[in-house]
Image (cartoon, rainbow, N blue to C red):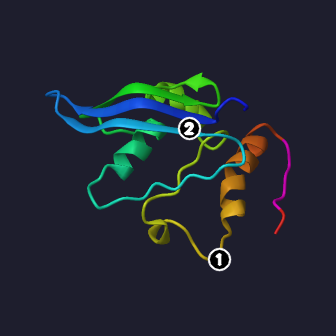
Amino acid sequence: MSEALLAVKDLAIVLQDGSRLLEGAQLTLHAGERLTIVGESGAGKSILAQAMMGTLPEALRAQGSITIAGHATNGERSRTQPLWGKVITMLPQEPWTALSPSCACTRRSARPRIMRKARAGARHTPKR
């Protein structure tokens, strides 16, 4: 099987006092697979996603391994942020507050690529 696009191994989310909010999270996602994280309120879905995106609040830190498209990010914003919109994107937990039904997700996810090309001086018009 090909290299995983996303691999999370033994992930724990830890408070400054050492308390663990989440521990033992593991998942692997390969090309062509889909991932949906579901669970009860307070189960840790949002902080798991924040750790993968490198957007944990300052009071929290990730322990364990997070690899995105071969990049060992380990939940560090400085390592993850260059991948935003290029390799990894997150739909929020409550997308109806952030997404418009009049804008298809494919157009929304294409926007970062369009903006990068515009900054580079290239012209690109998204298909409708």
Looking at the image, residue 71 lies above or below residue 45? above
Disc 1 marks a residue whose amino acid type is Ser
Single out the residue that lies furthest toward the top: 72
User: Which of the 4 quarters of the picture holds residue 83?
Assistant: top right
Q: Is residue 104 magenta?
A: no
Looking at the image, residue 22 lies above or below residue 93? above
Q: Nearer the viewer, residue 111 or 18?
A: 18
Binning the other alpha carbons within 10 Å of mark 1 as few (below 14), some (14 to 19) or many (20 upward) gives few
**Residue corresponding to mark 2:** 28
* 85 to the left or right of 54: right
Looking at the image, residue 46 lies above or below residue 9? below
Image point (54%, 33%), residue name: 7
Q: Which mark is residue 102?
A: 1
Disc 2 marks a residue whose amino acid type is Thr
Which segment is the magenta one? 122-126
Tell me whether the residue at label 1 lies in contact with that at label 2, contact meaning CB atoms closer than 8 angstroms.
no
Residue 101's x, y, as percent?
A: 60, 76
